[in-house]
Image: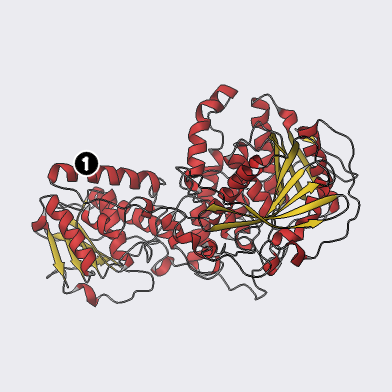
Amino acid sequence: MTNLRASIALSSFSFATAVLCTLQFGTLQVGAAEPEPDIPGDAIIRRYLRQETEKITQSFLAGVESAADWERGREKLHRQYLEMLGLWPLPPRTPLEARTTGNVERDAFRVEKVAFQSRPGLYVTANLYLPKRVEGKLPAVLYLCGHSGRGRDGNKTAFQHHGVWFATHGYVCLIVDTLQLGEVAGIHHGTYSHNRWWWHARGYTPAGVECWNGIRALDYLESRPEVDAARIAATGISGGGAATFWIAAADPRVKVAVPVSGMSDLETFVADEIIDGHCDCMMFVNTHRWELSMIAALVAPRPLLFANSDMDTIFPMPGNERIAARLARLYAILGRPEALGTVVVPGGHSDSLSIRLPAYRWINRWLKGDSSEVSEPEQPKIDGKELRVFPDELPAGAINDRIDETFVPVAHVELPKGQEEYRSWREMLLGSLRERSFAAREADILAPGVQLPQAPRNGRTLWILVPSLGDTETEWVNGHIANARFHTFHPRGVGDGAWKVRPPHTFERALALVGRTADSGRVWDLVLLARKIRAEVKGDFLIGLAGRWTAGVICAYAALLEPAIEEIVVVDPPRSHREGPYFLSVLQVCDIPDALGMLAPRKLTLAGANDETAKRVEAIYEAAGAKDCLKIKK
């Protein structure tokens, strides 16, 4: 591992997949109010998150002792990575429809104002910096922006000094706007502050959009006659530092990567709750429960430089140092320790000159074979309006502000025809659910104070009533379970185990980073409760679950995962997982009506469902030959 010096103090560090996403670069937008006091459930969920983080951290590079070990597993890891970004299979490379809307001329360089569509209607605005005179094919740099609010000018204008330096030193440099703070703006803060929890259910993350936009930006660079496609680097700071990793890990055309002040590890994000200072564009859907360092590992053994500031509070040094140590081990295993470099400069989260110079030098070294010192003469700033790609009107038909609705396709499940087809249909869907949404199994019930009920008499059903979050009523169950006593069970986050739910949704977002959601944990609590009852409560009885709204659907999924649950009552279910409950990537497999139908041939009472849901469940039960086991009530 190489330490670079630029007349500054140096130490080892590195980082993996964070993105500062605020309205002003380097400013944390988490509010100035005094923190509220904890409630008992906060301690429970914090302890749980730390435990899960530790388990995942210990698994990093498990079994990798040689370059051959790494290469055997690398293809699978790459596919998992793309899945978790919502990019598997890779979308079609539709025509870029690239156009230049204007030019800015200066004595030593020029700027083309460029727009292209990474997908039809998904606009990427960019500034392409070129030397004034181009002779032959030049190395190129893809610069990814930090989150600096520049309004209609796009945040690319805040980082123009990078483009100027590269263009005046023999490079082509493309600076691309981010989704949220670009000229054609979308949104990064879906779960952070907009309650778009269906992002988790769909398997959507704006990090996937940023990665895809970067991949298509590489396509654009390759199309330029000035660019040597064999010599392309990627770099950026803050959100751009994370995007550098997204793109370099996904696309081997990035030959050199310099992520700056934009990464940390799972322990920092989850256990230390630094996640509060970051938006959703730094998060993939961590279905496969990766330590975030694995994203950085996918860049190896290509040249990689970590750069950070020693007082950066949103990418703290302890996490950076842990990742640097992990990567140093991998680069050594792969026989390329010299291709991993680190640099730390004094100061906070800032795009300072002292942090830019080592990045320039690293790229020079690996793309040009030039290790000499570099400097950055001061240049006059170009007015942001002059760099606008669309100075007047934005393009009609742009979908940037609603790309979350279509970026990740959802499943369209065909109904089974007949009992034999039903069995294979159910097996396929259930296998996909176990792989995508319920891969992270639980070892213990997280709900506090669990007391097992007594067995009912004479082989009757032991009913477990499961309230939804905030639901204190139980009268609704009376018309659906005749002459039966029931035992009320509060799964995690409900009742005495409830934690505080408020922006920036620390616990809910951290759960997704350890491969779970609050709702998937509630499913496993019910599964484990049923197993515990069956193992420890003596008697001849059946186990039934009853729930209303999202709790009813949670009961249904628990029954799908646990055969000991033999009867289910679902009252007033949501129409779709867009409304809840939220399981990671579940909409890529099926939706609520399909899951309810998969319960066949077990007894299901479905009350208050909309007509479309009821008809679909009825059709599935009929195909399974179990229509008599379904009771539908209005």
Location of residue 549 in the rendering, given as x and y in whole percent from the top left corner? 30, 69
Graded by Cα atoms within 10 Å as few (under 14), some (14 to 19) or many (20 or more), the crowding at tag 1 reads few
Quarter containing the C terminus: bottom left
Give the residue type that dot 1 points to.
Ser
Task: Between residue 554 and residue 359, name the one nearer to us.
Answer: 359
Of residue 493 and residue 486, the one placed in the foreground of this image is: 493
At 42% from the left and 46% from the top, the residue drawn is 440
Q: Is residue 532 above or below residue 579?
A: above
For the residue pair 444 and 170, the one nearer the viewer reads as 170
Horizontal arrangement in the rendering, residue 310 relative to residue 7 (left or right): left
Q: Is residue 264 visible?
A: no
Q: Secondary structure at mark 1?
A: helix
Q: Quadrant of the N terminus?
A: top right
Percent position of residue 244, x then y = 66, 46
Q: Quadrant of residue 322?
A: top right
Residue 593 in view, yes or no: yes
Residue 341 position within the rendered picture, expressed as x and y whole percent measured from the top left: 75, 37
Whether residue 344 sits left or right of residue 90 in the image: it is right
Q: State the residue position of label 1.
A: 424
Question: Residue 466: which quarter of the image?
Answer: bottom left
Q: Is residue 339 above or below residue 110?
A: above
Q: Residue 319 vs residue 494: left or right?
A: right
Residue 13 x %, y %: 73, 43
